[in-house]
Amino acid sequence: DASVLAAGPCLVRIQDDEAYFAQRCYRHPLAIYNVSISRLTYRGTRLSEFLYRFFSEARSLKDNTDELLARIDEQLELFVYALDAHVDDCELILKLCFRADRDYAKSKAVRAHPGSLDL
């Protein structure tokens, strides 16, 4: 099903003894992902609501839209922060497959992907 987020079915299969999240005092990777996606969709929805208002209410560029444009700018900034946090959360999920961050950094599988350590 195309509506299912690709990571969900993979993360739901992770058992407590298959990763190091419990030993490293983190929530299950699926929980981390769900919170991250929820934050991202909330911020995206808020941005789209203000964009909809702008395109629905502004009849021309001469309309006074300064306040609405300021809110769009604010929501866009919050959305970008949520995107950045999501990338960080995804990197954390990957790191939780390893006993320690240094093991993640030394992994041949991780290092085989250019830029993967630059997340």
Image (cartoon, rainbow, N blue to C red):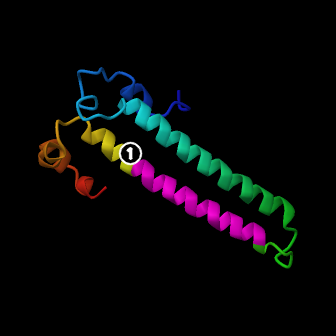
Q: Secondary structure at mark 1?
A: helix
Q: Is residue 3 above or below residue 77?
A: above
Quadrant of residue 115 in the image? bottom left
Q: Residue at x 47, y 42 (%)?
A: 36
Q: How many marks?
A: 1
The residue closer to the viewer here, 31 or 58, is 31
Residue 37 in the magenta stretch? The answer is no
The percent coordinates of residue 9 (x first, y second) are 42, 25
The percent coordinates of residue 13 (x first, y second) are 35, 21
Q: Is residue 91 above or below residue 62?
A: above
Quadrant of residue 117 in the image? bottom left
Q: Residue at x 88, y 68 (%)?
A: 59
Q: Residues within 10 Å of mark 1 (few under 14, many from 20)?
A: some
Name the magenta segment's main secondary structure.
helix
Q: Quadrant of the C terminus?
A: bottom left
In this picture, residue 27 sits left or right of residue 34: left
Q: Is residue 109 above or below residue 31?
A: below
The amino acid sitting under disc 1 is Asp
The residue closer to the viewer here, 10 or 18, is 18
Outermost residue, bottom side:
62
Residue 83 in the magenta stretch? The answer is yes
In this picture, residue 48 sits left or right of residue 92: right
Q: Residue at x 25, y 41 (%)?
A: 95
Which residue bears the numbered disc 1? 89
Residue bounds of the magenta highlight: 67-87
Q: Is residue 85 above or below residue 94?
A: below
The percent coordinates of residue 94 (x first, y second) are 28, 40
The residue closer to the viewer here, 27 or 51, is 27
